[in-house]
Image: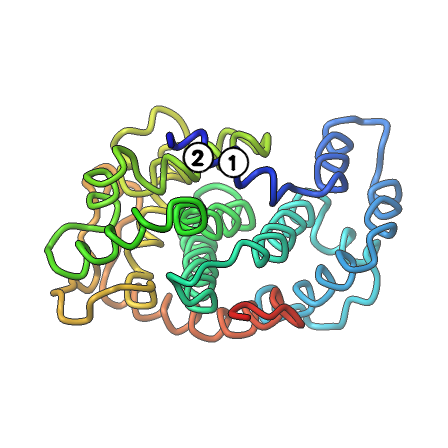
Amino acid sequence: MTAEQLARKANQLVSLPRAYHRITEMLDDPRYGAADIGKVIAHEPALTARLLRVVNSAYYGLPSKVNTIPMAITILGTRALNDMILATEVASSFAKLKSDLVDMADFWHHSIYCGIMARLLSKRLKIGEPDQLFVAGLLHDIGKLVIYRYAPEQAEQIMARFAEGPLQMYQVEREVLGYDHADVGRALVKNWRLADLYQDTTGLHHEPQRARHHIPMVSVVHAANALTKKVEPGYKLDRPAEDPPELRPTAAQCVPLTPVMVEDLRLEADVQSIEVFSTLFSGIPLND
């Protein structure tokens, strides 16, 4: 199967809720305000509960408790809240896409950690919108789950070869499949009708030098992923790792890393990732 065919299979099982696309349309229409958007969200009780858990977590670090969606919109803004709708819905929906080939909790820990790292880099370096970069980091490896689910025999070969040799996972995927998880992820994100930004960050996070648009944001996700390697499923601890990690030259120009900066970022990400993980997956069994 091609990357596009795998993505279409996944899209049949996991699709984004109408609420997300409806709110995205409303954000671009001056006829609608925060109250109108709040009413749409209010019709989704489970979504409302997940959003309020995230808004009240260490991720935002707000000084007082937020009890309602209108209050959340007032504090965060509608676009930031829509980014979090996307994040929470991807996490809860993709919990359905299980595989015996990977520990799902480990997979999502890596993805959430990458998202948080991308958000922290965005804020520190003033690149892009922090909550958009969180979503971009959360989505970056989504193609792996699709491969594990719909091409399990090839996925086993990929994991075995990766464990034996010096190649990166995406390089082994290309040898076995003819494409990699970034290609599959990009095709899925396109099927979901998400913004071009997410298509680029998902599809090019290993090769930011290929980006023609959104270069700083693609570079941030590339750097965030590099900083998250140590919590990636299948990562070999005996492989040498630079700290700070070596980035592609294109990304290194946009995202200058220093050892002190990396240490500070990891301390923050360590604290936030644990709470965000438990918040996004509260009540969702990942490995059953």
Q: Residue at x 33, y 29 (%)?
A: 211
Q: Residue at x 71, y 35 (%)?
A: 21
Q: Secondary structure at mark 1?
A: helix
Image location of residue 217, percent across then percent down: 41, 40
124 on left or right of 174: right
Question: Which numbered marker is on residue 189?
Answer: 1
Image location of residue 106, percent across then percent down: 42, 68
Badge 1 amino acid: Val
Does 57 appear above or below 99?
below
Q: How many marks?
A: 2
Q: Which residue matches tag 2?
A: 186
147 on left or right of 196: left
Q: Secondary structure at mark 2?
A: helix
Looking at the image, what colour scheme do you see?
rainbow
The quadrant of the picture occupied by the C terminus is bottom right
For label 1, the crowd category at 10 Å Cα-Cα, with few meaning under 14, some 14 to 19 and many 20 or more, is many
Looking at the image, which is closer to me, 149 or 212?
A: 149
Looking at the image, which is closer to me, 98 or 45?
A: 98
Does 39 appear above or below 231?
above
Q: Residue at x 46, y 65 (%)?
A: 104
Image location of residue 130, percent across then percent down: 52, 50
Q: Residue at x 70, y 67 (%)?
A: 53
Question: Which numbered marker is on residue 285?
Answer: none
The quadrant of the picture occupied by the N terminus is top left
Looking at the image, which is closer to me, 73 or 277?
A: 277
Badge 2 amino acid: Arg
CB within 8 Å, label 1 to label 2: yes
Mark 1 and mark 2: span between their CA atoms?
5 Å
